[in-house]
Amino acid sequence: MLPLEGITVVSVEQAVAAPFATRQLADLGARVIKVERPGAGDFARGYDETVHGQSSHFVWLNRSKESIALDLKDADDLAVLHQLLDGADVFVQNLAPGAADRLGLSATQLRADNPRLIHASISGYGDGGPFTTKKAYDLLIQCESGLVSITGTPDNPSKVGISAADIAAGMYCYSGILTALLHRERTGEGAELTISMLESLGEWMGFPMNYAMYGGTPPPRTGASHAAIAPYGPFHCAQGPSPAGGRCPQVFLGIQNEREWATFCHKVLDNPQLATDERFSSNSRRVENRAELTAAIERGFADRSVEQVVQRLEEAGIANAQLRDVQEFAEHPQLAARDRWRQVQTPAGQIRALVPPATVAGQEPVMGPVPALGEHTESILAELATRADQAATAAGSRR
């Protein structure tokens, strides 16, 4: 039995944050009914056409769900949603601020009829305050949270290459729902959860906030290096015979303490004196003298290929990596060795998908098909009609 088998989730969701949260629930066995607009559906369906003509975002976020097409501005369709919620354990929504209240879908309204309901709302900035109704998309939250200001190179701030704010909010919604389900198991009471993208990403900004608030200046933008640890990042090696993809030969390494620094100088660079050089004798001094440190390390790598440097790093027990592009990650030997790929059905054929990161011994995650828009509308409506007939029959027999 999967952990969430028997749990029904109804979600009025779109884009990334809420669908990411509910897909995690579906992976664990919950029944997730996704409510979409007739005609267009979740607008993430139209982000691109790269996966057999389908959106790369949508197929990632929506496997194992049922899709029902409802026009929530239509009284009859809204009544269907309320019928679904009568039998739901969890309701998730990321509608525009105020829209849920106007549709009678607030936590107060729904939990009055169903006290066991767990009601989760995701918004950009949260209720209350001057930004409550401000439009919120991932890039904008990355800007408002300060993430863009510390990402990139000294000359060019950059957004993170994935939807970090959406994913953060989705993960806190998911973990919040799991917490609320545990609480309900113990008390019988549902819960109201509110998650904002700004505050979710703000939690991830703990290190730079502390650095700025108590150090007086924000951590500098350092590209692929670390603002507060050195050596940590990319270092050039000798040009090998044919670096992958013609990329500049670099190795990435991360040294976490003085013992590792001394080992690195002695066993990798063959330069034990460097470990006690006054400029590099502590992490803070190495950060302060980063340019000189980088030059010293790259002199030590100048006559060695990436492969030779990596071999030395491995032998010395120093953490390291080579830069892979996304396609190379998809073919990563570690993922293959650990059997982390599965086939997932979509309306346009099968695709590869990674198994969820949290592995539960003896359990296989659901990883069911990605639904077509409104694919389950008729079957869900028929189920509701049967439920209504059964309720009427039961009421009649009690008379």
Image (cartoon, grey):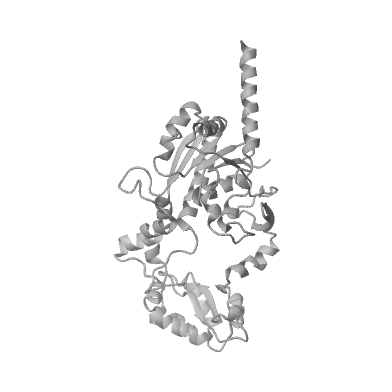
- Give left or right: position of 82 versus 388: left
Q: Is residue 37 visible?
A: yes
The front one of 344 and 40 is: 40
- Give left or right: position of 296 versus 87: left
On screen, residue 269 above or below 169: below
Q: Is residue 205 visible?
A: no
Q: Which quarter shows the N terminus?
A: top right
The spot of residue 95 in percent (x, y) is: 45, 43
On screen, residue 103 above or below 327: above
The spot of residue 284 in percent (x, y) is: 38, 72
Residue at point 31%, 45% (across, down) = 129
User: Which residue extends farthest top?
Assistant: 399
User: Which residue extends farthest bottom?
Assistant: 303
Residue at point 46%, 45% (across, down) = 94
- Give left or right: position of 186 versus 385: left
The total of numbered circles placed on residues is 0
The spot of residue 179 in percent (x, y) is: 51, 41
The front one of 14 and 237 is: 14
Q: Quadrant of residue 51?
A: bottom right
The spot of residue 314 in percent (x, y) is: 60, 75
Residue at point 38%, 49% (across, down) = 125
Q: Quadrant of residue 389?
A: top right
Q: Which quarter shows the C terminus?
A: top right
- Give left or right: position of 47 versus 352: left
The front one of 250 and 345 is: 345
